[in-house]
Amino acid sequence: MAMETVLSVADARKRFAANTALDGAAMSLRKGEWLALLGPNGAGKTTLIRAVAGRVILDGGTIDLLGQTISNGQASGAAAVEARRNLGIVPQDLALYPLLTAAENMMAFGALHGVPKAELKDRVRWALEWTGLNDRAKSLCKTFSGGMKRRLNIACGILHRPKVVLLDEPTVGVDPQSRERIWAMLAQLRDEGASLLLTTHQLDEAQQICDRITIIDRGKTIADGTIDQLVAKTLGKGRRVTVSFEPPLPAGAAVPAGMTLNDDRRSVTGSIQDVANELPALLARLSTAGAKVEDVHLERPTLHAVFIALTGRELRE
C-alpha cells in the first residue's frame, strides 16, 4: 500500500542575485518516515529547508504540506500559515534563552507555538522526561553541556506535537552518548506518528537510521531511494572482499582473476557479485596457489561511497 505523502517539493527554484540556490529540486516525505536530505556544502539544502519553513519565498515551484500548498512563488496566505502549525523546526544553531531554566525555555517556546495554556505544564513535564532533563529542570540553560542543550533545543521545537519535523544537523558537536540519546528521542517521535526530515553530514548515521535518502547537488535532486536502491543504481551490488593469509603468498603464485595482490603479499582485494557462489571458489583458488587463509572481510558499499560517486571528491566551501 502506498504511503501518504505529508510534504512534497516540486521544481523548486530560487536565485540570490547571480547565485542559483535551487534549480528544480524535488523531494517528498511520507507519513511516519525518516528521510535524510543530503548534499555537499552549497548544494541548496538550507535554502530548501528555509522555503519549507516559510523563511524563503521560492521563485518557482511548489511546496505542499499535509495536502495544503504552502508555497507557490508567492507569500504565504492564511491557509499556508495554518498548515505550518503542524510543522516543527529544530535549527542547527541553538535557539535557546541562556538565562532561563530548562523548564522556562520549554514554557516560553510552548507558548510561542500556541500550546494551550491548560496543556502547557503537562507538555513540559513530558518533554523533561523525554529529554532526560528532569533533574535539571530548574538549572539555567547556560550551565548545560552541549548534548543537554541539543536535547533541549529539540524539545523546544516539538512541544506543539507537530506532524512533520525538520531537523538541521541535530547531533552536531555532541558526544556519542548524547548522540545515542537524541536518536532514541527522535525514534520515539517517529514511532508516535511524526514524519522526520533530517539534514546531516554524518553519512554513517543517515545510513543506519533513515528509511530513505534524497541527495541534492547544485540545486537539483540527483538521487532518491533507500540505501540499497542507491547502491544498486550507482555502484552496483558487488561486495568488496579482502582475503588475508600467512605466510605471504609465494613468489610466482597465481593470483585469482579479478583480485589484486597487496604489496605485503599477505592479502588480496577485489569485488564479487555473488557471495555464496564466488567466495568459496575464490578461497579454493587461493589454497591451490599456496595461501593459508587467516581472515576474510566483506564490505558492502556505503552511503559515503554513493555520495562521493554522485557528487565528486572536491572540497566545497
Image (spheres, grey):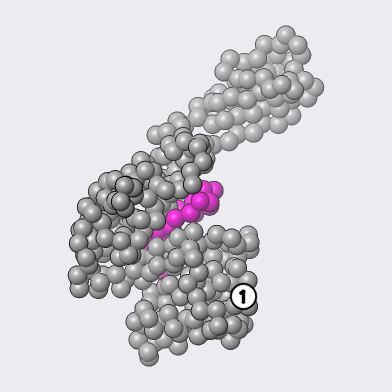
User: Which residue shows up at 45% across the image and 45% down it?
Assistant: 40
Is residue 81 rendered to the left or right of residue 88?
left
**Can I make out residue 52 in this image?**
no
**How many marks do you count on the picture?**
1
* Residue pictured at 67% horizontal, 19% vertical: 261
Quarter of the image holding residue 253? top right
Check disc 1 and give the amino acid type: Phe
Left/right placement of residue 225 relative to residue 246 reads: left
Q: Residue at x 47, y 36 (%)?
A: 312
Q: Is residue 136 left or right of residue 316?
A: right
Residue 210 lies in the magenta-colored region: yes
Residue 279 placement (x, y as % from top left) = 59, 25
Magenta range: 192-212
- In this view, which residue lies farthest toward the front? 17
Q: Secondary structure at mark 1?
A: loop
Name the residue located 50 percent from the left edge and 75 percent from the top edge: 96
Q: Position of residue 65 (x, y in %)?
A: 27, 63
Q: Is residue 88 magenta?
A: no
Q: State the residue in front, 199 or 217.
A: 217
Q: Position of residue 283 (x, y in %)?
A: 65, 22
| Residue lying furthest right | 247
Please name the residue that numbered disc 1 is placed on: 144
Q: Residue furthest top?
A: 252
Reply above or below: 134 against 167: below
Q: Quadrant of residue 289?
A: top right
Residue 245 visible in the displayed image: yes
* Residue 120 at x, y percent in the picture: 41, 86
Note whether 159 is above or below 185 in the view shown: below
